[in-house]
Image (cartoon, helix red, strand yellow):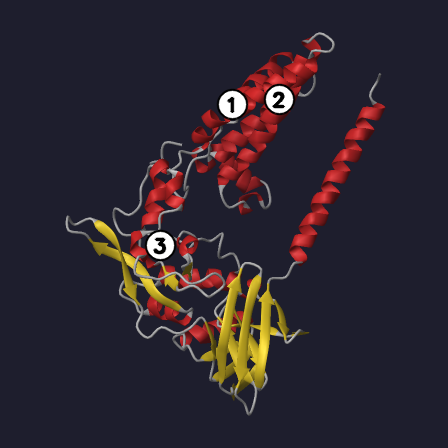
Amino acid sequence: TRGVRAEGVPSYPYFPSLTPGRVAWTLALLGLVAGRGARLRALALALAGSLLALGPATPLFRLLTETVPFAGTMRYPEKYTLLFGFGVLWLAALGASALERALPPGRGTAAFALLAAVVVLDRSAVTPRLLPMAPAAILEERPAVLASLSSTSPGEPPPRVFVFAAYRVPKGAATDDPGETGAALSRWAYPTVASRFGVANVLERDYDVSLPLPLLDRVLVLEAAPPGSPVPATLARAAGAVASVEGGQGPDGEAVPVLRPIPDPVPPYRFVARLVRGGSPREAAARFLAARAPTDVAFVPGAPDVREAAPGRVLRVSDRARGLELEVEGLGPGESVLLLSRPLVAARQALLDGRSAVVEEANGGFAAVAVPPGRHLLRLRPEGGWLIIAAVLAALGLSVTAVLLVGREAGAPG
């Protein structure tokens, strides 16, 4: 945890920490020495997890990914510390069982209560070793580069910025010290940092944030843009950004963050003049890029069709965590098309005046809704199906585990 990279180990972003705490280490050692059960299997699991977490630094990781199907689909090797954690927990459980057997009758409750207290007292020594941290004060300090942007009232759509410095990282902006990383990211208003201060980000480079394929395609396009290309600013403007954070030069020649306004910005929620339909979602996104990301056209998948859209107005916007609400007006005489520079995954459920409305993918991962003439109230929110599935699977897994444990205990000799 002293550095974020190592010489000679390419494509590995940072090293994992294997610090479960002194209490866990003590119990694990006790379990390894005096535990009853599969001590060697638990030890093998912990060792394999730690070696796999080091990724290409050891031959075990390469052997696994070349011989086991789908083993290479885990994005970061350090996620294999889960195996290490399970192994240490297994050994610690064996150690706790050995401790319980060694205690006189009736002393177990007091001993384990004291052990729990030691764990609580030890937590401040464990956490910094997991990963050196920046002071928590940076969570309350607005990055100086955003000083010229005024925050909006709660619920109103915040001004959006494009952190271009995340794609073209200026020399000296990054740090190899994990303890300094938080302050450096905050200074440059890197993705997910600015959103704490009433300012939203667009076109984040963070792959975990941009998991939907269309948004990942945008990231790849921006990464491939050569220096001086107008593509980044054009895409940022189409997404509703008002400014970009870029690298500048300070008085001593050092790299400093600079906020550059985007000429003639457009609102993130707006009515378009034309609807171009045709092909798959990826083909529609490709046509959007080929047309140089126009701000007044919605490219959507489907049967080939091109038609003009009636004008419209956005009267009010309430953008909150529970969903997006817009009061809009279609000016007619035909149907209007509202383009929302909001990821489709966050706007799949739509109600227009209380009735279900169709949300289409537009311009590569964003959303579009047809609006009839007149005033309407539109509400959009993500689908909740995956949350229900996750809750059901978690409950099912817990139930199966409980049944197996109860069955094993019932079948054990008295």
Give the percent coordinates (x, y) of residue 381: 59, 64
**Mark found first going from the N terminus, 2 or 1:** 2
Q: CA distance from mark 3 to mark 1?
A: 39 Å
Which mark is on residue 166?
Answer: 3
> Where is mark 1, residue-wise?
121
Task: Look at the numbered disc 2 and give the secondary structure of its residue.
Answer: helix
Instruction: Tell me which corner region of the image, top left, top right, bottom left or bottom right, holds residue 178.
Output: top left
Q: Is residue 352 visible?
A: yes
Q: The residue under label 2 is which amino acid type?
A: Leu
Q: The residue under label 3 is which amino acid type?
A: Ala
In the rendered structure, are the residues bearing label 2 and label 3 in contact, judged by CB atoms less than 8 Å apart?
A: no
State the residue at coordinates (43%, 55%). 195
Please name which of the two marks, 2 or 1, marks the residue nearer to the observer: 1
Q: Is residue 123 above or below residue 319?
A: above
**Mark found first going from the N terminus, 2 or 3:** 2
Q: CA distance from mark 2 to mark 3?
A: 42 Å
Horizontal placement of 381 versus 153: left or right?
Answer: right
In the rendered structure, are the residues bearing label 3 and label 1 in contact, judged by CB atoms less than 8 Å apart?
A: no
Q: Is residue 301 visible?
A: no
Q: Nearer the viewer, residue 260 or 315?
A: 315
Which mark is on residue 25?
Answer: none
Q: Is residue 297 above or below residue 348?
A: below
User: Which residue is at the far top?
Assistant: 104
> Where is mark 2, residue-wise?
91
State the residue at coordinates (68%, 9%). 103
In the rendered structure, are the residues bearing label 2 and label 1 in contact, judged by CB atoms less than 8 Å apart?
A: no
**Mark found first going from the N terminus, 3 or 1:** 1
Q: CA distance from mark 2 to mark 1?
A: 22 Å
State the residue at coordinates (38%, 75%). 292
